Amino acid sequence: MYQLAIFDMDGTILDTLEDLKLAINYALHVEGFPERSLDEVRRFVGNGIVKLVERAVPEGASETDKRNVHEAFDHFYKLHSKDHTKAYEGIPEVIRKLRAAGVRTACVSNKPDYGVQALVEEYFPGLFDFSVGGREGIALKPAPDSVYEVLSNLHISGSSAVYIGDSDVDLKTAENAGLDAIAVLWGFRDREFLISHGAKVFAENPEDLFSLITT
């Protein structure tokens, strides 16, 4: 049994896509840029807000344009990060079940740290021992820095932890940190995409996570 389960946030424990789409489209609209579809935003997310902005703005946008879009996104998302976001069905229950079985839990995301802390408090109060999002001085995933911060704070070795996510970024993060990985199939990427990026262990539903983590 793993001692620690580290969860990605967007596409893994929370369906945040609609609120991310609304926030980036607000920011694009403010700068006079065309808006993006839900499927486009689905492809753009995973590497943090800087990358989301770079992928969403039109080709040739200036650094000033990108900075303005980023600032408008932050302004909007701080106010509206919970308008349409919801926990995936069965996720809170399986996290409670894991904790009751003695598994510690953490959340690591490239989402800005203000968003991570607010959403964890809203949807998973008391269910994570440690949560960390994107902030100054810590490299975003797939760099292993945020995972190392969790391991250090909880005094658990990487060999006793598993990383759960829905994207290529999560798979690479686990590899870079030296952790086993579980790819979930209800998130923002499909099985074929995940297999092409090295996924070997899959959870088709939240209940699968319990058996994969505890046996």
Image (spheres, grey):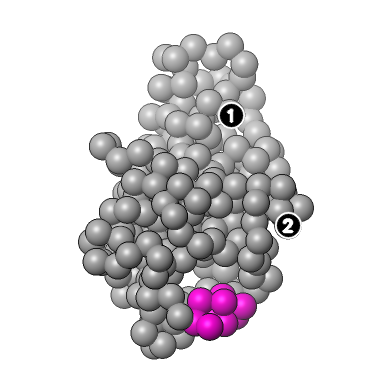
Query: Residue tagged by mark 1?
Result: 56
The N terminus - image quarter:
bottom left
Instruction: Say which quarter of the image contains residue 120.
Output: bottom left
Find the magenta span and give its range: 207-215
Provide residue 118's location: percent of width, then percent of height.
34, 57
Q: What is the quadrant of residue 140 in the picture?
A: top left
| Residue located 46% across and 26% down the image | 69
Callout 2: 10 Å neighbours few (<14), some, many (20+)?
some
Of tags 1 and 2, the one toward the viewer is 2
Tell me if residue 177 is in the magenta stretch: no
Specify the amino acid type for callout 1.
Ala
Q: Nearer the viewer, residue 44 or 65?
A: 44
- Residue 169 is situated, as x and y percent measured from the top left of the image, at 54, 46
- Where does label 2 land, which residue? 191
Residue extending farthest right: 192
Of the residues shown, which amino acid type is indicated by label 2? Arg
Residue at figure coordinates x 58%, y 11% from the top left: 60
Local secondary structure at mark 2: helix
**Residue 81: % across, % down:** 44, 51
Q: Position of residue 201 (x, y in %)?
A: 63, 66
